[in-house]
C-alpha cells in the first residue's frame, strides 16, 4: 500500500492577485496533499477577506507571529520583490520551507545571503518558475539531454507583452530599488528560465536595453544575443510595449524545429513539432512530442515541490538551479550598460552587478552585505 502522509501545512504571505489567481487554486488542486492554515498581509482587512473566500482559518498581519502560532511546513511568499529577502529568511530561520514568487531576489548578493539560511536537509527555498513543469517542456528537455533531435543550433526566446502607463502607478513597479529591473526581471524571466533550463549553461551574452515609452527608472525593452556551452545561439527579447502579446520560444535542431507560443501558460496544443526535410512526413509523436498533456502551472510545480518536501530533498528551482536565471539577468544588464560581452565568471562579489541589477550602490546592497557578514 502507498505510504500515507498528513497534509503539508501551508501559509500564504501576501494576498494580492497572484495569490488569488494562481496559488490558492494550485493548493486546491493537490487532492488533499496540502492544506492552507494561515494568511499574512500588512493589510489585515484584505487578508481577512481573502481568508474568508478561501476558507483559511487564521489571519495575521505579522509574519513572525504567524510562524510561531501556525507552525507551517511551507510558506508561499507573494509579496512585492523588495520584501522577498526578509520574508524568506524569517521563514527559513523558523524552520519552514519557502516557495517564493519571481523574481527570486533583487540581486545575486541577496540570493546568496538567503541561501546561507538554508540547512543541508532543509528547510529550503525554491522559486516559482512554473513554465518548466509542463509535459512538453519536460519531454523536450529529455530530447536535448539524449540528443535524439541532434544538438540544438538556433533559438528564440521572446516575451512580448503590453503594460500601459497605469500599470506602473503601483509605487514599487518600474524602480530598481523595489522591483529590481524592468520586463527582463519581472516578465521575461519565466521564458528565459525555461530557455536556460532546456539549453543548459550559457557562456556569453551581448545585450541592449531601452526605456522607450514608459515613465520608469528601469528599461521597458531589452534584447540579447546569447551563446551556450553546447554551441547554440539564442536571441532574446523582453518587452512591455507590444500590443499583440505573445510568449514565443523556438528551438532549431538538425532533425526538427520545436516551437512554443502562448501567453501566460501552455499545454501541448501550444507546441508545434516540425520535421526537417529529410524526416519526410514524420509526425509530432515521431519526433518525440509527449502523449501525456500536463499544462504548465503553479499546480504542476507545487505537486513536485510537495514530493521533494516529503523526502527532505532539495526541490527544483532552488539553490544553483534557481540562481541560474538571476545570474543571467545580471549579466544581461551589465552587458547593456557597458557595451561589453559578459561571461558567467564575471559575476563575482567585486562586480557591481552582483549587488544590484542597475550596477549602482543601493540600500539593498548594503543590507545584503550586512547579512553576509553576519553568517
Image: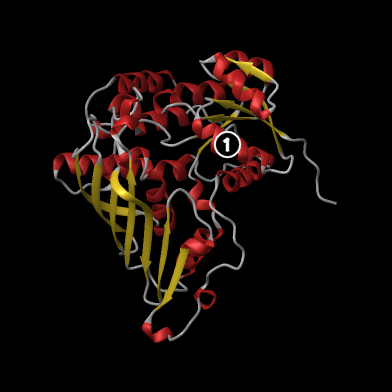
Tell me the element at label 1: helix
Please tell me which residue lies in front, 364 or 281.
281
Residue sitting farthest toward the left: 339
Residue 157 can be seen, yes or no: yes
Say which residue appears at 65% left-offset and 41% top-offset. Answer: 306
Residue 141 can be seen, yes or no: no
Instruction: Identify the image quadrant of residue 201.
Output: bottom left
Q: Position of residue 117 (x, y in %)?
A: 51, 26
In the image, residue 105 above or below residue 190? above
Image quadrant where one finds the C terminus: top left
Number of labelled discs?
1
Please tell me which residue lies in front, 117 or 101.
101
The colour mode here is secondary structure
| Mark 1 neighbour class, 10 Å CA radius: few under 14, some 14 to 19, many 20 or more | many
In the image, residue 131 above or below residue 367? below
In the image, residue 100 above or below residue 150? above
Instruction: Identify the image quadrant of residue 152.
Output: bottom left
Q: Position of residue 343 (x, y in %)?
A: 25, 48
Q: Position of residue 350 (x, y in %)?
A: 25, 31
Q: Is residue 292 left or right of residue 138?
A: right
The residue that mark 1 highlights is 23
Q: Position of residue 341 (x, y in %)?
A: 19, 49
Say which residue appears at 64% left-offset and 38% top-offset. Answer: 27
Amino acid at each position: 500500500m502507498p505510504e500515507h502522509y498528513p497534509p503539508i501545512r501551508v501559509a500564504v504571505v501576501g494576498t494580492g492577485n497572484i495569490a488569488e489567481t494562481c496559488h490558492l487554486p494550485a493548493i486546491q488542486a493537490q487532492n488533499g496533499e496540502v492544506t492552507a492554515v494561515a494568511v499574512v498581509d500588512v493589510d489585515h482587512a484584505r487578508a481577512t477577506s481573502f481568508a474568508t473566500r478561501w476558507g483559511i482559518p487564521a489571519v495575521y498581519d505579522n509574519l513572525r507571529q504567524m510562524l510561531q502560532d501556525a507552525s507551517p511546513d511551507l510558506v508561499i511568499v507573494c509579496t512585492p520583490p523588495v520584501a522577498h529577502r526578509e520574508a524568506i529568511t524569517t521563514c527559513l530561520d523558523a524552520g519552514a520551507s519557502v516557495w517564493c514568487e519571481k523574481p527570486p531576489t533583487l540581486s545575486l548578493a541577496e540570493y546568496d545571503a538567503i541561501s546561507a539560511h538554508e540547512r543541508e536537509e532543509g528547510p529550503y527555498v525554491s522559486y516559482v518558475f512554473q513554465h518548466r513543469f509542463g509535459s512538453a517542456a519536460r519531454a523536450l528537455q529529455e530530447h536535448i539531454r539524449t540528443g535524439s533531435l541532434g544538438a540544438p543550433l538556433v533559438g528564440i526566446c521572446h516575451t512580448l507583452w503590453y503594460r500601459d502607463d497605469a500599470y506602473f502607478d503601483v509605487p514599487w513597479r518600474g524602480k530598481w530599488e523595489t522591483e529590481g529591473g524592468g520586463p527582463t526581471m519581472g516578465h521575461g524571466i519565466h521564458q528565459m528560465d525555461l530557455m536556460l533550463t532546456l539549453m543548459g549553461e550559457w557562456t556569453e551574452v551581448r545585450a541592449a536595453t531601452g526605456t522607450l515609452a514608459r515613465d520608469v527608472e528601469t528599461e521597458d525593452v531589452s534584447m540579447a544575443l546569447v551563446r551556450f556551452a553546447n554551441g547554440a545561439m539564442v536571441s532574446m527579447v523582453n518587452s512591455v510595449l507590444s500590443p499583440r502579446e505573445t510568449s514565443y520560444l523556438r528551438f532549431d535542431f538538425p532533425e526538427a524545429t520545436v516551437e512554443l507560443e502562448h501567453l501566460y501558460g501552455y499545454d501541448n496544443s501550444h507546441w508545434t513539432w516540425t520535421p526537417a526535410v529529410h524526416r519526410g512526413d514524420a509526425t509530432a509523436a515521431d519526433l518525440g512530442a509527449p502523449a501525456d498533456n500536463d499544462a504548465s502551472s503553479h499546480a504542476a510545480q507545487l505537486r513536485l515541490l510537495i514530493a521533494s518536501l516529503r523526502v527532505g530533498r532539495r526541490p527544483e528551482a532552488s539553490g544553483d538551479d534557481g540562481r541560474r536565471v538571476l545570474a543571467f539577468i545580471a549579466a544581461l544588464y551589465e552587458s547593456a550598460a557597458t557595451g561589453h560581452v559578459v561571461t558567467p565568471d564575471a559575476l563575482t562579489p567585486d562586480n557591481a552587478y552582483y549587488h544590484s541589477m542597475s550596477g549602482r550602490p543601493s540600500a539593498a546592497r548594503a543590507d545584503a552585505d550586512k547579512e553576509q557578514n553576519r553568517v
